[in-house]
Amino acid sequence: MRVFVLLWGLVWVLAATAEMDDASGSTFAQHYFKAWEATQMPDASEEELDAYLALLTDDVGYQHLPYVTSGLRTAGGKAELKKGLLHYLGSTTSYQATLEKVMVGHNVIVIQYHTVVTGVHPDTQQATSLDYRSVDVLELDEGRVAVIRHYSK
């Protein structure tokens, strides 16, 4: 399954060269969401991270207020995002997310999803239990995600 996800991600990146219409944008959003979801599972490995990261530009910008405020594209954006993802890898004991809405615009995809997660925070070793909705605004450049703006409580 992990190899399939990685290969599908690479095929998608290579095939997505033009501006997306509603149908292809919706398909990309669902693939992006599944790849993201795979990185959050209790048994996730670096393979899932790499499959997800294959959907992003190397200079991807990431913003999650109030924690990460910039959101600007930087030369090491993907490497920094991977470093952060590796820090939390395997910290969930259960993860369930439901994609609720997708909106496709000019080189932008907006996804809304609901997450229920439990785990142990890697820094404090405190048990966590969260139930929240998120909205991600994905700005695209040549068929890959160039900026992620994450909004949640």
Image (cartoon, rainbow, N blue to C red):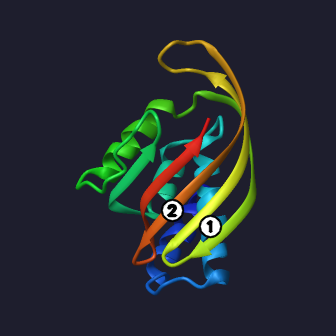
Q: Is residue 121 left or right of residue 133?
A: left
Q: Is residue 1 visible?
A: no
Q: Image quarter for residue 53?
A: bottom left
The spot of residue 127 in percent (x, y) is 65, 15
Question: Tag 2: Cα neighbours inside 10 Å, few (<14), some, or many (≥20)?
Answer: many
Farthest residue in the left direction?
75
Specify the quadrant that holds the N terminus. Answer: bottom right
Closer to the N terminus: mark 2 or mark 1? 1
Element assignment for label 1: helix
Depth order, front residue of 18/110: 110
Residue identified by numbered label 2: 138
Identified at 46% across, 34% down, the residue is 66
The tag on residue 144 is none
Identified at 48% across, 84% down, the residue is 19
Question: Tag 1: Cα neighbours inside 10 Å, few (<14), some, or many (≥20)?
Answer: many
The spot of residue 23 in percent (x, y) is 67, 82
Identified at 68% across, 55% down, the residue is 112
Q: Is residue 133 left or right of residue 14?
A: right
Up-down: is 32 above or below 125? below
Residue identified by numbered label 1: 29
The spot of residue 39 in percent (x, y) is 57, 45
Element assignment for label 2: strand
Q: Image quarter for residue 32?
A: bottom right
- Residue type for callout 1: Ala
- Residue type for callout 2: Leu
